[in-house]
Amino acid sequence: MGSDYIPERDIKAACWMKNFARLLVAQPESYRTTPEDAAEIDALVLAFRLAQIKAWTPITRTRVSVKGKMLARKSAEQMVRPTAQRIRNDPRIDPALKMQIGLKPKTQRRAQI
């Protein structure tokens, strides 16, 4: 099974999603998305990052804050994954832009001999 493009650990996932959202907001036309969708992704990623900080800090770490972080990550991923797959599979988007946003360009399958 291939590795996932969104890291498993929360801190790395937050960094990856932050870069993804930042580049989408900065260049929505380059990634063939609307500014509204980019802003929605940015808001969900920000909510996840804030929940992650709250759940990570020992003073505010409770079961409720950890559950909130998990729900915030899930809602962010539910918006990020379809957008990332659409960007990855769109041949009109430059492969360099795909690499910049954190996605590996789709590769051609090798012919079986």
Image: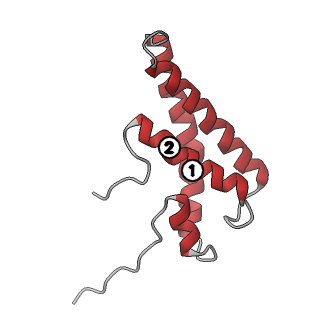
Residue at 40% from the left image edge and 46% from the top image edge: 7
Kind of residue sitting beneath label 1: Asn
- What residue is drawn where x is 68% and y is 37%? 43
Left or right, 35 with respect to 112, comes to: right
What residue appears at the point 58 percent right and 76 percent down from the top-left corner? Answer: 91
Cβ atoms under marks 2 and 1 closer than 8 Å: yes
| In this picture, residue 39 sits left or right of residue 69 | right
Q: What element carries label 2?
A: helix
Task: List x then y, in percent, for residue 63.
Answer: 43, 11
Quadrant placement of the N terminus? bottom left
Of all residues shown, which one is farthest toward the bottom? Answer: 113
Where residue 104 appears, as percent x and y from the top left, is: 45, 66
Q: Residue furthest left?
A: 113
State the CA–CA distance, disc 2 to disc 1: 6 Å
Quadrant in which residue 62 is drawn = top left
- Residue at (67% x, 42% y) in the render: 42
Q: Is residue 105 left or right of residue 113?
A: right
Mark 2 residue crowding within 10 angstroms, few (<14) / some (14–19) / many (20+):
some
Q: Mark 2 points at which residue?
A: 15
Judging by the rendered image, the residue that carries numbered circle 1 is 19
Residue 111 against residue 40 in the figure, above or below: below
| Element type where label 1 sits in the image | helix
Depicted 47 relative to depicted 109: above or below: above
Dot 1: within a 10 Å radius of its alpha carbon, few (fewer than 14), some, or many (20 or more) residues?
A: some
Task: Tell me if residue 111 comes above or below residue 74 in the rendering.
Answer: below
Which three-letter amino acid code belongs to the residue tagged 2?
A: Cys
